[in-house]
Every structure is written in structure tokens, then in C-alpha cells.
Amino acid sequence: MIGYLGVLLPGVDPRFSILLEWGGVLVFGLLVGSFLNVCIYRIPRGLSVVAPRSFCPGCHLQIEAWENVPILSYLILRGRCRRCGLKIPLRYFLVELTTGVLAAGLYLRLGATREAALAFVFACALLVVAYIDLDFFIIPDRISLGGTLLFFLASLPTESEADWGEAIVGIASGWTLGAPSSAAGWRDSLVGLATGGLILLAIAWSYRKFTGREGLGGGDVKLLAMIGAFFGAKGVVPSLLVGSVLGSLTGVALMLLRQADRRTALPFGPFLSVGALTYLFQPAGGLPPAWEWPW
Ligand SMILES: [Zn+2]
């Protein structure tokens, strides 16, 4: 294994170039994670994600550049604001770390490709949605609908394409065999986003009809549409299934711990996001065929 940098810099010691390459990917992921923390805090509060600079929500002290280094700052400050001592939630640390791991995982799987970049954007969107939904029970449209549009546009043909018939056969086999579909193009993305949206819309409608309660929000519907736009229709059902199972298990666990009862509402976004991430990283291919493991 010599890596991409090793190919670009043939004279350099491969051990050094590998270290540099993976270190670079990890640091990039951590920095993006730091930005995702800003998004998670600011988007649901209607604040701009670019300005002003970060501040402590307790004492409004502006956070200096050295305090904004992912992971390290949290450890150096021991999780507290240096002026008022307000606890910095452990989540900031976890989001940074998770983003770094996602970047490294996608790089391992897809290399320095357009697909890796797109999958990373997808994973970041899921992460932000999960935490915002956990806090506020909302999934911002600008992420779910923005993502749906972005992933659909990204699926527009660049080279070979399957026709409608192939797309439908691919979707059917993806559902029944769990195998990756052979067609992943704009039609698949379009069918995927429609499938994702419609399935949840139908479930939400029947739930309301039979229980008289609101079980799923419109945000969940748009999130599954985004997941469908990214994977194509084949990824919709697996993501939904894994999300539902995880959500149910969590609900039961909370009831057993007496932290919740039958009527307690759990946000569905975090579970749906984990479902989609599971599908993305499953070895049999949540990714279109051209995105298979390189070995
Ligand atoms: Zn403070």
C-alpha cells in the first residue's frame, strides 16, 4: 500500500507519505466536525453559521482560535469555558471525533474521489440532522430539502446510464435480494426520493388515522426523501428498517428504565440517520457498484 500521496510523490518514504495522507484526512474530518457543531447549535436557533465568531453561550466570551482546535482544545480546557467554567457538552468532542472517523472511513472505502466527497457531505448532513432533531424535534428543511436537491443534481448523468426498465429491475432486486442495484443514475435518485418521501408519508398518515396522534413529522418524510435521493430507492427500505428497529429498541429500553412511557415521543431523525449510515457502510454495498471496495 503506497497511497495516493505515495503515487504523487514517488521519492518520499512511503511510511511518511501514508502517515501524512491519513493524518491529513483525519484532521480535515475533525475540522469539518468542528463546523458541524456550529451548524447543530446555530441552524435551529436561526443564527448564521458563518458569523459571528464562536462564543460561549454562558458568558458570551468570544472563543479564541487556539480554543477552537478540534479534540485538543476540549482536552486542554477539560471541557469547560475558561472564563465562566460553563461545561462544554461532551457532544462537541463526540461530533468532531465522529466526523473524523467518517472522513477516514469513506476515504478508506472510496479513496480521493468525487463519490467519497459526496458521501461525506451526506454523512455530515445525517449527523447534523440527528443532533438537531434530538434537541429540538425538528429537521431543518434547508438540510433535508437542500440535501435532496443536491444529491439529485449530483446523480445527473456524466457517462453511462441505465434506462427506466433497468432502474426498476435494479430497485426490485435491491429490495428483494438486498443486493446493490445495477442502475444508479438520476432516475434511480428521482425514484428513490419519491419512494422515501411517499413511504413515510403513507406511514405518517395511517398512524394518525389509526391512533389519532401525530407519530411522524414532515421532517422525517423529507429526510427519508433525501436518503432516497442519495442511495436511490434500494437504500430507502433498509435505512428505514434499521432506523425503526433501533428506535423501537431504544423506546423499549427507555420504558424499562422508566425514563419514558408508551406516549413519550422520540425523535425519529437520529434513528433514521443511523439507519442510513449503516447502509452506507455495509460491506455488501450501500454504494453504487462503481463505488465498491477497491480490493
Ligand atoms: Zn463562558
Image (tube, grey):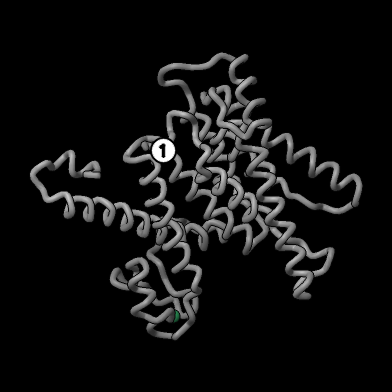
146 vs 32, left or right, is right
Please tell me how crowded label 1 is: few (under 14), some (14-19), or many (20+) other residues with Cα within 10 Å: some
> Whole-percent x and y of residue 49?
45, 56
Q: Which residue is drawn at 54% across and 36% down?
A: 230
x, y percent for residue 193: 62, 33
**Is ligand 1 closer than 8 angstroms to the Cβ of mark 1?**
no
Q: Which residue is drawn at 12% across and 51% down?
A: 13
Q: Where is residue 204, by image quadrant?
A: top right
Q: In which quarter of the image is the C terminus?
A: top left
Compared to residue 71, the image places residue 129 above or below, namely: above
The number of callouts visible is: 1
Q: Mark 1 points at which residue?
A: 293
Query: What residue sits 76% from the left and 61% below the top?
Result: 265
- Establish if 24 lies above or below 59: above
Q: Nearer the viewer, residue 200 or 113?
A: 113
**x then y, percent, for residue 155:** 49, 28
Ligand 1, by image quadrant, is bottom left
182 or 228, which lies in front? 182
**Can you name the residue that lies furthest to the left here?**
11
Q: Which picture quadrant has residue 79? A: bottom left
Secondary structure of the residue carrying numbered label 1: loop
Residue at 55% of width from left, 35% of height from top? Answer: 231
Say whether residue 39 is left or right of residue 253: left
Give the percent coordinates (x, y) of residue 84. Answer: 44, 85
The kind of residue tagged 1 is: Trp
- Quadrant that contains the N terminus: top left
Looking at the picture, tell me which residue is in the foreground, 231 or 265: 231
Residue lying furthest bottom: 84
